[in-house]
């Protein structure tokens, strides 16, 4: 199953302010935990509303004031109906994801990111501006992202600055090593000294919740193909009369010469 991005770009405020990465990422996490069941596939707007209801923090438009703590995001996930907790250690992170949990991953983007990692078009645009135009090659920013594991599609990482449309509809494929690198970006950037697992929260559906069985789609009846009629032998036709042959005796006159 592919991991759906819940984009914060749809909630850009006056002046280009984007401060909803936390609740947008939590909306993605909770939707995954509930396997996109009907009524459980949340939008970024749902996450933003849930954060306000859970924390009372008012987001003033045009002001960068809606940054989130991990504790606030645990409350946000619970408001959306999920269970949420801190990771205990790195094994807990990996095992929980492989058991179906979603991971909230707090990063210092793009500190220490591996070369070649696919970043959002939004990030690539601003990276060029910051690094080239403004001569700030070491500029980073605190950011909330998320990751999941699927037995078929593997590890996937979703940055909410992806558009959620077209080529950015789903998360980026990564591996465990890259996940660790992302979660360790806070330490690498010297923003804090905590180990990587301290930057991850684990989000699951409530214990005992079972995804509803998919509803069978009604199939319109198909009319049976017409059966070809058995071939009928043509009725025998009377034989054509034999061509008359002049009598050798009458010369064809019907009068027999004596």
Image: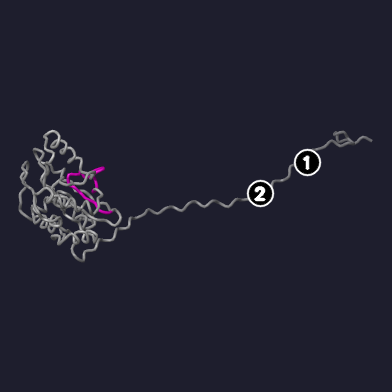
157 and 108: which is toward the camera? 108
- Name the quarter where the N terminus is drawn: bottom left
Q: Quadrant of residue 252?
A: top right
Q: Residue at x 24, y 63 (%)?
A: 210
Q: On the picture, is 127 further left or further right than 245?
A: left
Distance of label 1 from label 2 (alpha carbons): 21 Å
| Disc 1: CA contacts within 10 A as few (<14), some (14-19) or many (>=20) | few
Question: Can you give x and y, in whole percent of width and height, for residue 19 in the image?
Answer: 10, 45
Q: Which residue is mark 1?
A: 242
Q: Is residue 185 above or below residue 139?
A: below
169 in the magenta segment: yes
Closer to the chain start, of discs 1 and 2, is: 2
Q: Residues within 10 Å of mark 2 (few under 14, many from 20)?
A: few
Report whether 138 appears left or right of 213: left
How is the model colour-coded? one colour
Is 35 in front, or is 256?
Answer: 35
What residue is shown at x 24% (from left), y 59% (from top)?
98
Q: Residue 210's mark? A: none
Q: Helix, strand or loop at disc 1?
A: loop
Viewer-nearest residue: 86 or 225: 86
The quadrant in which the C terminus is found is top right
Which element is circle 2 on?
Answer: loop
Q: Position of residue 112 (x, y in %)?
A: 17, 47
Disc 2: which residue: 235
- The magenta segment is 154-171
Residue 100 in picture, x, y percent from top left: 23, 59
């Amino acid at each position: 199953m592919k991991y759906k991005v819940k984009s914060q770009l749809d909630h850009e405020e006056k002046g280009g302010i984007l401060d909803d990465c936390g609740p947008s990422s939590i909306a993605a996490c909770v939707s995954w935990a509930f396997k996109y069941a009907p009524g459980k596939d949340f939008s970024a707007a749902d996450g933003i509303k849930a954060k306000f209801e859970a924390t009372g923090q008012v987001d003033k438009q045009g002001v960068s004031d809606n940054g989130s703590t991990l504790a606030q995001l645990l409350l946000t996930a619970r408001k959306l109906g999920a269970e949420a907790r801190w990771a205990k250690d790195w094994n807990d992170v990996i095992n929980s994801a492989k058991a179906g949990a979603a991971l909230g991953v707090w990063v210092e983007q793009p500190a220490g990111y591996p070369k070649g990692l696919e970043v959002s078009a939004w990030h690539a645009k601003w990276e060029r501006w910051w690094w080239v135009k403004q001569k700030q090659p070491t500029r980073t920013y605190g950011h909330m992202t998320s990751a999941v594991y699927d037995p078929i599609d593997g590890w996937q990482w979703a940055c909410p600055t992806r558009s959620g449309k077209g080529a950015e509809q789903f998360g980026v494929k990564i591996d465990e090593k890259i996940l660790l690198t992302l979660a360790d970006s806070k330490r690498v950037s010297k923003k804090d000294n905590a180990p990587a697992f301290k930057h991850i929260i684990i989000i699951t559906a409530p214990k005992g919740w079972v995804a509803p069985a998919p509803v069978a789609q009604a199939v319109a009846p198909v009319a049976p193909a017409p059966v070809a009629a058995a071939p009928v032998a043509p009725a025998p036709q009377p034989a054509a009369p034999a061509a008359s042959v002049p009598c050798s005796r009458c010369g064809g006159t019907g009068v027999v010469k004596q």
